[in-house]
């Protein structure tokens, strides 16, 4: 019973001590929360920095992949230039047949040209119905080899079609107008690529 009496007599002091302890615990809790918030903020900043670094690494990897792909394409183009045929039409100053122009088809490339044909019109004419396609003789031209053909004077353009060892179709479009000159086209997959 003495305890209850002592508690009643000292209740004010005990309440003050309790209030003080609660205040101290509240301050400690606030400081712990403040420190926790600071740590979370630092972790978020670090996570943002890591995300930026990861983005930069991803972009660097993408650029490296694009560069590697471009190098592979350049290497493939170089290999193709080293092994591909390239047919050009040159005027042939030999005896002309009336209403015709004489040309030499010359292989200026490094590879052999197979299945050489020609027709009147530009490249688009290859899909036309009833087009007259003429094989040249010989139909295979080694590098620096040539063959002669007679082209009708009325043709504004004519197309030479051939294949290389890679079996890709190639075309040379020859225009009567010397300003237009000749165009060279290569089949790459499903695309027809005009060469410079």
Image: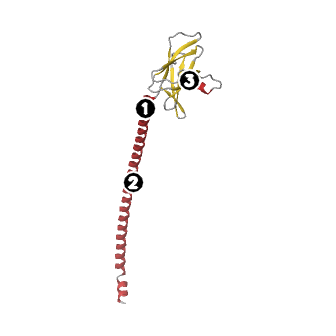
> Of callouts 2 and 1, which one flags the residue occurring earlier in the amino acid sequence?
2
Q: Residue at x 50, y 13 (%)?
A: 92
Say which residue label 1 marks.
79
Q: Viewer-nearest of labels 2 and 1?
A: 1
Residue at the extreme right? 130
> Of callouts 2 and 3, which one flags the residue occurring earlier in the amino acid sequence?
2
Q: Is residue 125 above or below residue 47?
A: above
> Of callouts 3 and 1, which one flags the residue occurring earlier in the amino acid sequence?
1
Disc 2, SS = helix
- Residue 84 lies, in percent from the top left, at 46, 28
- Residue 66 lies, in percent from the top left, at 43, 39
The residue lying toward the viewer, choosing from 101 and 125, is 101
Crowd around label 2: few <14 · some 14–19 · many ≥20 (10 Å): few
Say which residue label 3 marks.
117
Disc 1, SS = helix
- Residue 115 lies, in percent from the top left, at 54, 26
Disc 3, SS = strand
Compared across the picture, whether 76 is left or right of 9 comes to right
Marker disc for residue 156: none
The residue lying toward the viewer, choosing from 62 and 116, is 116
The CA span between labels 3 and 1 is 25 Å
Crowd around label 1: few <14 · some 14–19 · many ≥20 (10 Å): few
Q: Quadrant of the N terminus?
A: bottom left
Say which residue label 2 marks.
47
């Amino acid at each position: 019973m003495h305890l209850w009496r002592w508690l009643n007599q000292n209740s004010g002091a005990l309440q003050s001590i309790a209030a003080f302890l609660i205040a101290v615990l509240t301050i400690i809790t606030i400081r712990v929360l403040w420190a926790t918030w600071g740590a979370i903020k630092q972790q978020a900043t670090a996570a943002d920095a890591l995300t930026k670094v990861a983005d930069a690494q991803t972009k660097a990897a993408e650029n490296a992949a694009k560069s590697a792909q471009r190098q592979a394409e350049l290497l493939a183009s170089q290999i193709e230039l080293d092994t591909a045929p390239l047919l050009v039409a040159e005027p042939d100053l030999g005896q002309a047949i009336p209403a015709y122009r004489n040309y030499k088809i010359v292989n200026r490339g490094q590879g052999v040209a197979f299945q050489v044909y020609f027709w009147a019109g530009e490249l688009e004419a290859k899909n036309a119905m009833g087009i007259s396609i003429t094989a040249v003789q010989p139909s295979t031209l080694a590098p620096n080899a040539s063959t002669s053909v007679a082209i009708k004077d009325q043709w504004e353009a004519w197309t030479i079609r051939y294949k290389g060892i890679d079996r890709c179709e190639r075309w040379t479009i020859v225009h009567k107008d010397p300003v237009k000159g000749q165009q060279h086209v290569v089949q790459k997959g499903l695309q027809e690529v005009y060469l410079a």
